[in-house]
Image (cartoon, rainbow, N blue to C red):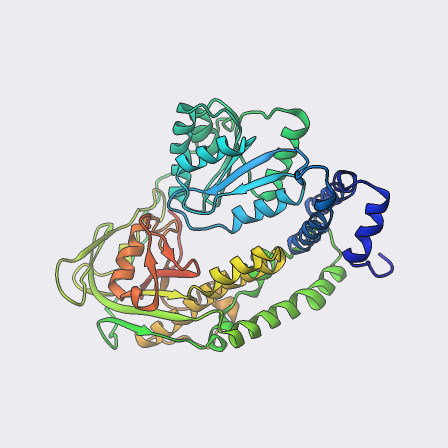
Amino acid sequence: MKGKIPPLAVAIPPLLGKHSAEDILNNILVPAMKEVGRLFNDGILQLPFVLKSAEVMKKSVDMIKPHMKKDDSASGRGTMVIATVAGDVHDIGKNLVDIILSNNGFRVVNLGTKVPVERMMQAVREHKADVLGMSGLLVKSAAIMAENMKALEASDIRIPIFLGGAALTPGFVAEACQSKYSEPVLYCRDAFEGLARMRELAETGRLEKSRPPAAQQRKIEAEAPRIEIRSAPAPRVPFLGHRIVPSVDLNEVYPYLNSTALIRGRWGYRRGNLSAEEYQRILREEVEPKLARMKKDCIESGLLQARVAYGYFKCRAEGETLLVHPAEGGASIPLTFPRQGKSPFLSIPDFYRRDEDVAGFLVVTLGPGLETENMRLLQRDRYQDYFLLHGFAVEVTDALAEYWHAKMRAEMGFPDPKLELQDYITQKYRGSRYGFGYPACPDLSMNKACCDLVHAAEIGVQVTENFMMQPEVTTSALVAHHPQAKYFYV
């Protein structure tokens, strides 16, 4: 594009002199955002640029809104009530849906996080919603969505339901959710699929129900032997019980930041259909300066306060259960893990001795500053900054956990050899760190056990009634010292 794009203060007034506000919205702004969506779907435009376009759309609508004949910036295209389900505090996905739909001509009523289905139904009736959207990150959130379908079916509500979240699959939505509700229940893998379905509903007035995937013949696997886990002596740890680290220098944490996961995964700067040269230019001129500035700003502002609670505890394994002995005494805490149903038939307690061993636990957090700042950015319609800061903070949380895990390995007597960042990603060190809620240890109630053991409340971490940790940029883990312990899936 040649020439400098004029600012909105210059571009909008002449348009208002030639067109009605409604025409500008419906025939210029909404089609422009539709083109932005097409470019994104075709792999030409990255998500952060889509959000920057949404910022321009929002400011433009705010400028023309006083000239509209009625206060209806959504142009009657449709209304969605959206919420994160009860017990779940995650809202980045839901808020992206809000941003994308709102700036493509739809009205969105965002109820926030941890919302019971009764409140959702009340909002649907109050706002005469065309669609109800539910979001959630956790496996338990998916189960709550399925239960919510029963309540909706028993009510007078008969509108399509859109479901999104990391734990969902099209098969689960079709089998566990659609089967309980008489109107369409659709799985939306991201905000743009939600936008496409909203457009379909607005243009055709109907949506197809989800259908279970075609039955697939189950493969019968030959029995394979269990992997032999060699006995390993318990490490000598510097203390038993917990310790609090009230402040960690982010300059020590940043070298553990997985920039590839951040830039391509969290931030969505993917090459797509761009040439290698064009993609490298975007990384060099747009992305890398943003990352460097964000690192510097978060240190200078004190926005992210890195803190750690960790400790070592005596334990022993019994089958799939790890019995952890609190340092203060009292009954042991049983932590039961699933076992793989196929070779190598692993369960986490396999990596601990049956007589006496030591287990490490850690909780790391970046504090509550992110949530306050994200709210401020959203209120100021700074969508791109909100999205980038959230992704950055999530990856820095993982980096903090990786950094402190390395310190724990050194304390247990096996410091890392000289490793590159990729070596940490591929676990070229001794032992492993298992985060609760992941496939090898999916039981989120272990978050509470871990936080209690290391006194995580002393670093400002609380556990919700559904065993999620707050602040959001917090993670916990069980640390195994065994040389054969690595990531695995159940």
* 32 over 199 or under it: above or below: below
Q: In which quarter of the image is residue 27?
A: top right
- Counting from the top left corner in percent of width and height, residue 461 is at 34, 62
Q: Report if residue 324 is visible in the image.
A: yes
Q: Report if residue 360 is visible in the image.
A: no
- Counting from the top left corner in percent of width and height, residue 486 is at 38, 59
The one of 300 and 395 positioned closer to us in this rendering = 300
Q: Please identify the residue farthest to the left as the structure is shown.
A: 330
Residue placed at 40% from the left, 61% from the top? 474
Residue placed at 25% from the left, 74% from the top? 237
The one of 344 and 355 positioned closer to us in this rendering = 355
- Counting from the top left corner in percent of width and height, residue 326 is at 18, 63
Whether residue 374 sits left or right of residue 7 in the image: it is left
Whether residue 99 sits left or right of residue 348 in the image: it is right
* 463 over 194 or under it: above or below: below
Residue placed at 69% from the left, 52% from the top? 59
Whether residue 131 sits left or right of residue 283 in the image: it is left
Whether residue 208 sits left or right of residue 402 in the image: it is right
* 131 over 102 or under it: above or below: above
Residue placed at 69% from the left, 37% from the top? 70
Quarter in which the N terminus is drawn: bottom right
- Counting from the top left corner in percent of width and height, residue 18 is at 86, 43
The one of 353 and 135 positioned closer to us in this rendering = 135
Q: How many labels does the image show?
A: 0
* 425 over 208 or under it: above or below: below
